[in-house]
Amino acid sequence: MTSVPQGTKLTITLPDDFHHHFRDGPATANVLAHITKQFGRAIAMPNLKPPVTTADAALKYRDHLISNLPEKLPDGSFEPLMTLYLTDNTTDEEIRKAHATGFVKACKYYPAGATTNSDAGVTDVKKTYPALRAMAELGMILCIHSEVSTPGIDIFDREPVFIEEIIKPLVEDMPSLKIVMEHISTKEAVEYVKSAPDNVKASITCHHLLYNRNSLLVGGIKPHFYCLPILKRETHREALLGAATSGSNKFFLGTDSAPHPVENKETSCGCAGIYTAHAALELYAEAFESVGALDKLEGFCSFYGADHYGLPRNTGRTITLEKKEWTVPDKYEFGKSVLVPLRAGDVVQWSIVE
């Protein structure tokens, strides 16, 4: 493990987050207070109750996000990028309507029952083909939660099975569709994305780069380390870290920061999701520093995702990190409740220079 001296500063182009859960209601403002300090844009996940399945719903949700931005935030300094929740019944007409808004940049494929609020997700990928053909024609991105939800498939094997059963045939059938395999978590996913055509790329979370399943299971079950895809063996974490720090434009930042009120995590059947919006960029810096790859951080955080989405880079806008530790609070406000963030009560090695 490598390390740079305390006080080291690193300035990079302002990054974007290509996978974020803002939630709905009053808690959204709490999330925005964190993410807007680190990112210029963020893909807004559509798995609300009810899910964001139409262009009109996406515009309404965008209005909610804009109205909850921090008051002191300069106008235009943060942009939510909207998505539609793909279902078996999504039409090509709805895709065209969403694209025409100029605000909806992607559709999200949740296998039915695979994760939080995914009950209305896709049951058969072939049912989405009319919508996917329209997306390919328009250049819209397909974001995929790349796990099967088939009963009987081991939770640690769901991603490799999805690659074989869904992704490979889909890529063959839709060679011009731009795809993001989101929050990949296995060595098999890394190897597949490396070998896949250039229209297939992947996002990686900071928690999958920093932790393995021991953090979740050893010494007692730690509910605030429970996420989907679930944390895997150390060999998989090492493969993800190697991919993220390789300098390949196939891999880019997507936090999958997923807040839940503490009572929904610390319970007999807790929700999946790790909250990292308070310190995501600093945690990515820790991961990259650990293998001596801070020179690769800017591409991963600030360039490759924007390029794949066909968005301009945040040229002329920068953010500075400093090797200066700080202690994460035990909790943060979250609407009428509180949430427990990653590293609660513990130290993060990097800070953002205000």
Image (spheres, rainbow, N blue to C red):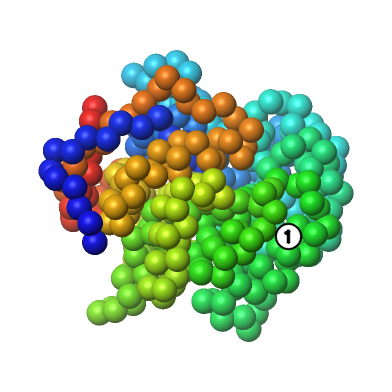
Q: Amino acid at mark 1?
A: Val
Between 123 and 177, which is closer to the camera in this rendering?
177
Q: Quadrant of residue 116?
A: bottom right
Question: Which residue lies most toward the bottom here?
Answer: 152
Q: Is residue 228 above or below residue 308?
A: below
What percent of the width, then of the height, locates residue 346?
18, 55
Regarding residue 217, the answer to whether it shows in the image is yes
In the picture, the quarter occupied by the C terminus is: top left
Residue at left offset 52%, top offset 76%: 156
Between 291 and 265, which is closer to the camera in this rendering?
291
Judge left or right: residue 66 versus residue 5: right
Q: Is residue 56 above or below residue 258?
A: above
Judge left or right: residue 297 versus residue 172: left
What percent of the width, then of the height, locates residue 228?
50, 64
Residue at left offset 56%, top offset 81%: 154
Q: Secondary structure at mark 1?
A: loop
What percent of the width, then of the height, locates residue 63?
57, 27
Residue at left offset 81%, top offset 53%: 174
Q: Is residue 353 above or below residue 291?
A: above
Regarding residue 326, the answer to whether it shows in the image is no
In the picture, the quarter occupied by the N terminus is: bottom left
Residue at left offset 72%, top offset 39%: 140
Q: Quadrant of residue 265?
A: bottom left
Count of marks placed on residues = 1
Judge left or right: residue 180 versus residue 133: left
Q: Residues within 10 Å of mark 1 (few under 14, many from 20)?
A: many
What percent of the width, then of the height, locates residue 318?
36, 26
Question: Which residue lies most toward the left here?
Answer: 6
| Residue that mark 1 sits on | 122
